[in-house]
Image (cartoon, helix red, strand yellow):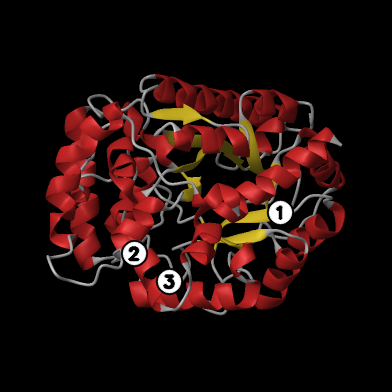
Amino acid sequence: MEQTTIRKGTSRIVRSIVVALVVTTLAGCATSQGSDPQPSADEIHRDLLVLDAHMDTAINFGRECWDFSEAHPLESEIAQVDLGRMAAGNLDGGFFVIFTSQGPLTAEGYRAALEHARQRSDTIDRELAKFPEMVGLATTAAEAEALNAQGKLIAFKSIENSYPIGDDLSLMREFYEAGVRMAGPVHGGTNQLADSSTDDVRWNGLSPLGKEWVGEMNRLGIIIDASHSSDAVLDQMLALSKAPIILSHSSPRSAYDHPRNIDDNRIRAIAAKGGAVCMSSIFLSELDLSGERGELFDRYDSIAQMSPAEQRELSRRWRALDATQPLWGSSFDQYVEALLHLIDVAGVDHVCFGTDWDGGGGIDGLMDITDLPAVTARLIDAGYSREDIAKMTSGNVLRILRAVEAMRER
């Protein structure tokens, strides 16, 4: 598609910020004189428009002495995404998540959740506003392409868990007007809208309010995200939604049999309705949150309230555990195998990427966004063309966003 073949521009300001990083970190990947004139995988990757459908990076916004515009070294930093590493050519943007953990289905619970979600949305806005020459908020596919053409990075906003709206669907309009363009009904616990894939069944799919929520999403022009939803919820969404839907960060169940993953028949059903599955790095194995790892995982949620010294110590301990107790037991080869299976089942027009950066995603070989060119290299090795890869790195997400925009207009 046309929008996926735009060559990345790089503004003078962005170039000045990242030139030293590019020289030092990519020099070892440069092609020597007299070698094959074909572009390297790194060069092809930097030439693509690359979006990720699910980034929990906002958890880091507001950290004292932490600069979102810098390129932080993974070896000593828990955050996997920042503008410095994005601008180096590895990731052009994606959906920054307004995440709310599941609480009680009471008026008090809804009030607290709504306050949290509003604050998280405002936090994203404030952080982006600090660096207007580097990144901009996009609310349409056309705005994303315009930012890319200007050499700027792209930030969309999404909601993970619509629990904060309580029983008031009109609140979805408030979040739409705040820039949200993707939302899922549920997270790890069943709520007032839907059954979670990892909790007890209450509604046998969507609740009556959840079915109304689907219609409201279509009416407003917000992409429906089915990640974390139970199989029955996904089936009902496909039947009810007049627009294509996305799974923003899910893996094939064939790779690892877990309810958070999606089976081949449902992959085909999503594709048949024009939607897409965004390949994640999570649940390709069991999640290990035992002992110290679980303690640190729980503390990460409050990193923005920690002193710089506490942040450094959390990052140090987290990275030390990567060598002795990985969060996931899967390998990069297993990830690629699962990705190729997903492409084979869905087709290149219905695959995207949502690695779950800063929300538990990342495996050895794909631990932060600087590793993304390795994924492109594997796709090239598997025989996929630049055009095919461009659909998966951004074209399919922007196509679905356009379809949802058109639904709103109708």
Which residue position is annotated with label 1? 245
Residue 193 placement, left or right of 143 = right
Q: Is residue 312 above or below residue 307?
A: below
Q: Amino acid at mark 1?
A: Ile
- Residue density around tag 3, few if under 14, some if 14–19, many if 20 or more, within 10 Å: some
Query: How many numbered markers are drawn?
Result: 3
Residue drawn at (46%, 36%), measured in percent from left and top?
149
Which residue position is annotated with label 3? 379
Q: Is residue 209 above or below residue 136?
A: below
Q: Quadrant of residue 322?
A: bottom left
Q: Earlier in the sequence, mark 2 or mark 3?
A: 2
Q: Position of residue 106 (x, y in %)?
A: 71, 33
Q: Amino acid at mark 2?
A: Ile
Q: Position of residue 218 (x, y in %)?
A: 80, 41
**Between 80 and 16, which is closer to the camera in this rendering?**
16
**Between 103 and 254, which is closer to the camera in this rendering?**
254
Q: Position of residue 398 (x, y in %)?
A: 61, 47
Check residue 363 in the rendering and tell me which mark sits there, or answer none: 2
Q: Is residue 390 above or below residue 146?
A: below
Image quadrant holding the N terminus, namely: bottom right
The local secondary structure at tag 1 comes to strand
Q: Earlier in the sequence, mark 1 or mark 2?
A: 1
Q: Amino acid at mark 3?
A: Leu
